[in-house]
Structure formats: structure tokens, C-alpha cells
Amino acid sequence: MKRFPFAYFVLVLSCSLLAHPNMKITPCGLPDQHNDDTMTTLKKYDLSEMGAEEIHNLPLLTQQQLIISAKEAVKEDRMASLPVTHTLSAVQVLRENSEMETVFVTDLLFKGRKFTFVEFYPGGNPSGYYFSFGTKKIIATNGDSTVTCLE
């Protein structure tokens, strides 16, 4: 019993030192593996249970990013092909094709650069699109936690 605290300390120290030993930075400035521990969350919207009024009250840019993301996901055949004509239909497409209807829009900071990530879970891992902060331009995709730059 006296050894447990020391063993626990060694385990925690080892894990923290080795947490991200193979992480590489992509050409678009993101880590090559999506990992919430490596980025700072600036703002996060959880759309999983938002009602229509709350969705309509999201910032216009956020609504546009959701529509773009849903259209891209349908185009890439990640999702069931439902028509995406406005923000509510975009959120519906992302929810219906996401595990437990989980959808987030998160503003992130990584190494001094800001991004917006529209995230959904068509499998068990996060998928989605990274936008250059404050724009409608997709700069990277995330599929099964692997980040791929489009630039």
C-alpha cells in the first residue's frame, strides 16, 4: 500500500510527458491529429439540443459555416443526402447523421492562430471542417481525428 502513491505519481508523470510525442503541425497550422488537449477553446456552441429559435440567433457567420459544412458532408458522401437549404436543415443533417446527434461549433486557438471547427460524429470519432477564423473558407477537414489541409 505504501508504494501506490509513488507508482501513481510515476504513471501520471509518464503520461503527461508522453501525451503528444508524435504530434506534427500541418501546413495549414493545425496539429495533424485532432486533440482537444492541444488547442484552447475560445467559444463553443453545442447544437445537439438547441431549438430553432436558438439556432436562428447564432451569429450569421456561424450559420453560414454550418450550411457549408453540411453541404460538404453530403457531397463527400459522409451523410445521408437530405437537401440543405438553410441553417435548420444543415443542423438537422449534421444531427441525424451524428452519433447521439452531437454537433459543435468551436472557436479554437492553436499556437497563436484562430480557427473555427464545425464538428460532428458520423462514426465514433470527431469529423468536421476547420474554417479560417472569421471566414467561410474551409482550410482543413477532420476525418476520424486525422486533419487534412486543403490549402
Image: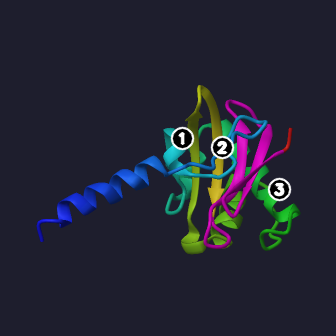
Q: Which residue is mark 3?
A: 72
- At x 60% / y 37%, what residue is drawn? 59
Q: Nearer the viewer, mark 2 or mark 1?
A: 2
Amino acid found under the numbered disc labelled 3: Glu
Q: Are marks 1 and 3 in contact (CB under 8 Å)?
A: no
Q: Residues within 10 Å of mark 2 (few under 14, many from 20)?
A: some
Tag of residue 39: 1
Q: Nearer the viewer, mark 3 or mark 2?
A: 2
Q: Tell me if residue 41 comes above or below residue 5 in the rendering.
A: above
Q: Which residue is mark 2?
A: 31
Q: Residues within 10 Å of mark 3 (few under 14, many from 20)?
A: some
Q: Position of residue 62 (x, y in %)?
A: 65, 41
Q: Position of residue 112 (x, y in %)?
A: 59, 25
Q: Are marks 3 and 2 in contact (CB under 8 Å)?
A: no
Amino acid found under the numbered disc labelled 1: Met
Sequence-earlier tag: 2 or 1: 2
SS category of the residue bearing label 2 = loop
Q: Are marks 2 and 1 in contact (CB under 8 Å)?
A: yes
Q: Nearer the viewer, residue 122 or 39?
A: 39
Residue at mark 3 to residue at mark 2: CA–CA distance: 22 Å
Bounds of the magenta segment: 121-149
Residue 82 in the figure: left or right of residue 60: right
- At x 54% / y 56%, what residue is drawn? 47
Residue at mark 2 to residue at mark 1: CA–CA distance: 9 Å
Q: Nearer the viewer, residue 6 or 151?
A: 6
Sequence-earlier tag: 3 or 2: 2
SS category of the residue bearing label 1 = loop
Taking the magenta stretch, the answer to whether it contains residue 65 is no
Q: Position of residue 35 (x, y in %)?
A: 57, 52
Total numbered circles = 3
Give residue 145's quadrant in the image: bottom right
Q: Residues within 10 Å of mark 1 (few under 14, many from 20)?
A: some
